[in-house]
Amino acid sequence: MKKQKQISESLQLGIILALSGGFMDAYSYVCRGKVFANAQTGNILLCGVHLSEGNWQLALRYLCPIIAFALGLILANVVQFHLKDKKVIHWRQITILFEAAVLFLVGFMPQSANLLANSITSFACAIQLESFRKINGNGIATTMCIGNLRSATQSICEFLYTKEKITLFRGLLYFTIIGFFAIGAILGNVSVKLLQEKAIIISTLFLLVGFAMMFFNGEDEKVID
């Protein structure tokens, strides 16, 4: 007996989510006052720096997205706990659709609402991070790269030592997600120059594609012979 692989753990969906993840980070940094949507390490660092200098308003600019990120993680877990046994629609489809909806709203927020826009974007990123944690059975993040880079490098080193092809493929998988994250960031920067605040709607479209992939390919985790 074995479990059927879910589309939510497929490379195809991982690529779509990585594009969206890179896009969101570039959007929040370039268009919304140089705040990170995904990289909360950077936000914590900058919040601490501004606190040490007594710049309370600037510290708040980074503190709010950090709090929103934590709330997004909580929401994703609550949805999973309450809806994981539903058969009509999978709980991950609900989270990705909700993420797309809130990002769509961000696209209509003016520059004067950057604090709220960045907080909502970080909230959405956290939902994605917590809901989609594996690709082909490997723990991979689609909203940040530091863990992926560590795992990719470790896998390549293992391959050089053991010559086991599975470790090479694992390393290439991580590097593939990193590459598409970077492509998403490039698309985000270009889109901001063309569409300004509304550029984030493109990230919404990526997520809707992901939602459709899960809907048409099926997301029930069945046990088969």
Image (cartoon, rainbow, N blue to C red):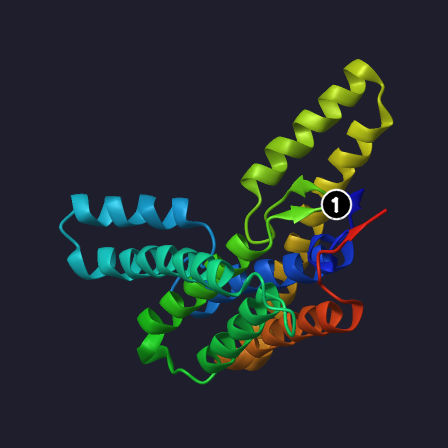
Q: Quadrant of residue 108?
A: bottom left
Q: Against 211, is 56 above or below?
A: above
Q: Residue at x 72, y 57 (%)?
A: 15
Q: 110 or 169, which is in the foreground?
A: 169
Q: Quadrant of residue 109?
A: bottom left
Secondary structure category for the residue under label 1: loop
- Quadrant of the rendered image containing residue 41: top left
Residue at (72% x, 21% y) in the render: 157
The residue furthest bottom is 108
Outermost residue on the top side: it is 161
Quadrant of the image for the N terminus?
A: top right
Answer yes or no: is residue 29 visible. Answer: no
Q: Which residue is mark 1?
A: 136
Q: Residue 162: give x, y in percent of width and height.
A: 80, 15
Where is residue 159 drawn, in percent x and y? 79, 22
Task: Report the side of 119 relative to 165 (left or right).
Answer: left
Say which of 189 and 124 sits in front.
124
Is 161 rendered above or below residue 71?
above
Of all residues shown, which one is farthest toward the left?
54
Front residue (pair 130, 157): 130
Query: What residue is drawn where x is 41% and y is 61%?
Result: 72
Q: Is residue 123 left or right of residue 165?
A: left
- Return the residue nearer the eye: 103 or 199: 103
- Type of the residue with mark 1: Asn
- Seen at 47% across and 55% down, the residue is 38
Q: Residues within 10 Å of mark 1 (few under 14, many from 20)?
A: some
Give the number of callouts. Answer: 1
x and y, in percent, of residue 221 in the image: 71, 56
Residue 56 visible in image:
yes
